[in-house]
Image (cartoon, helix red, strand yellow):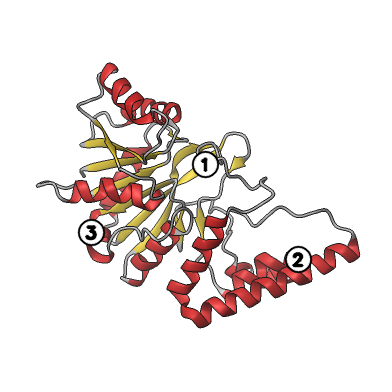
Amino acid sequence: MKLLVVIVNFRTAALTLEALACLLPDMEGLDASVTVVDNDSGDGSYETLCREVAARGHGDRVTVVASGRNGGFGFGNNVAIRRALAQPQPPDCVFLHNPDARVRPGTLRTMLEFLDAHPEVGVAGTRIHDPGAGRHASAFRFPSVLSEIEGGLRFGPVSKLLRKHSVWADAPDHTAEVDWVSGASVFFRREVFETVGLFDENFFLYFEETDLCRRAHEAGWRIWYVHEAVVEHEEGAATGITNKNKRVPQFWLDSRRYYFLKAKGRTGLLLADVAWVTSRSLWRMRRAIQRLPDPDPPQL
């Protein structure tokens, strides 16, 4: 299968070069290439990447392009995907790879063999491992009103009752079908883009892969988590956003709102907001009464 790897860079040239150092050996023997999209970093990243790719002799397998503006994660990936789809021989698969991710040896071949053996699977995510924190979230459930209640209330009996509705599912310990997978390390079959379109660029960051997986799922494609393929990913190394942040970025909130509006309509968004505000308020009351420690912000 012909593979295109896409890395979106925004002021992370050093991380991107490290990612390439892991990727290129894993591409040996495969019909694979890499497109690095610089999302208008404005810090010399584009020039650095072009210079280093040429100096290291990677120009035959790595192409660096400038997006022209920082339109977000989905926008940057779309630049490379549109470019690839317009070629006479477009790739069979597109692998979206974060600049702060590192493939373990054999990852690419494992994923391509899985997709080749399962033509019904349109989207497949790898296992993601955070070297500093252990297992990292890799597979998820679609957000819903019930997931908003579970996430906001943080009450053991309710969480147990709504476990099957929690977005933050434990990563399976085996290869399995899931709702959606992390955009930090995910393979898309070309036909998915031809069937449902590219990323919705109204999402700047976060929820864009959730939305695309939802659209693929509704179109009949299956989405799987592949446990045997492993990528190292240090949370927040590229974005600077981790679960330890005290304030959730406004663009995360904007993306959440847009996702519910698009997937559930105005009524669904209203119900999700009411569910979150009510459950979160009850949590704060319980925290004050029981003098519980200040919680982390909603997981990103």
Q: CA distance from mark 2 to mark 1?
A: 31 Å
Q: Amino acid at mark 1?
A: Thr
Above or below, comparing residue 83 to residue 41 in the picture: below
Nearer-N-terminus badge (3/1): 3
Q: Is residue 88 above or below residue 13?
A: below
Nearest the eye: 26 or 277: 277
Mark 1: secondary structure: loop
- Within 10 Å of disc 3 (Cα), the crowding (few <14, some 14-19, many 20+) is few
Which residue is pictured at 32% across the width and 26% down the height?
Answer: 47
User: At 79% across and 54% down in the image, what residue appears?
Assistant: 294
**Is disc 3 in contact with disc 1, using a CB cutoff of under 8 Å?**
no
View extreme (bottom): residue:
267
User: Which amino acid, by three-letter code, is at mark 2?
Assistant: Gly
Q: Circle 3 is placed at which residue position?
A: 191
Q: Position of residue 132 (x, y in %)?
A: 62, 34
Q: Position of residue 286 (x, y in %)?
A: 84, 67
Q: Looking at the image, which is closer to me, 264 or 155?
A: 264
Which corner quadrant of the image does residue 66 belong to? top left
* Secondary structure of residue under mark 3: helix
Query: Which residue in the structure is indicated by mark 1?
Result: 239
Identify which residue is drawn at 36% across, 67% down: 215
Left or right position of 8 against 127: left
Q: Amino acid at mark 3?
A: Glu
Q: Is residue 275 above or below residue 43?
A: below
User: Which residue is under mark 2?
Assistant: 156
